[in-house]
Image (cartoon, rainbow, N blue to C red):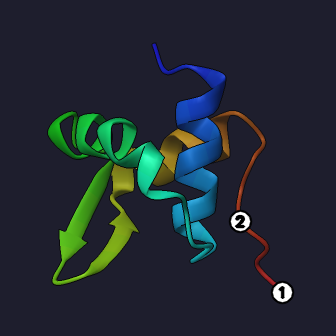
Amino acid sequence: MLTDDQIATLADIGQAIAFSPARQDEIDGLLREGYVAKDGDIYELTAKGQKVLTDRGAGLNEA
C-alpha cells in the first residue's frame, strides 16, 4: 500500500509539478513498482499510477 507521501508525489508528477531532489528515492520506488514511467528527463504516471489517484479521489484537474 502506498503512503500518503507517495500518493502526493504521484499527484505532483501527474500535474507536472516540480519536486525536490530529496524525493528521488521515493520516485525511484514508484518507478520500480510501476506507478511512474520516465521518458528522458520527464516523469509521467502509468495507468497504474493514475488508477491510484482516481481511486483515492485525488484525480487530476480535467478542465
Quadrant in which the N terminus is drawn: top left
User: Of all residues shown, which one is farthest toward the front?
Assistant: 22
- Estimate the x, y position of residue 20 in percent, counting from the top left: 53, 58
Q: Is residue 32 left or right of residue 22?
A: left
Q: Is residue 63 above or below residue 11?
A: below
Q: Residue at x 24, y 62 (%)?
A: 37
Q: What amino acid type is highlighted by mark number 1? A: Ala
Q: Residue furthest right?
A: 63
Please tell me which residue lies in front, 58 or 28. Answer: 28
Residue nearest the observer in this picture, 31 or 62: 31
Disc marking residue 63: 1
The quarter holding residue 57 reads top right
Q: How many marks?
A: 2
Q: Which residue is mark 2?
A: 60
Q: Which residue is situated farthest in the top direction here?
A: 1
Q: Residues within 10 Å of mark 1 (few under 14, many from 20)?
A: few
- In the image shown, does 31 or 63 lie closer to the viewer? 31
| Alpha-carbon span between mark 1 and mark 2 | 9 Å
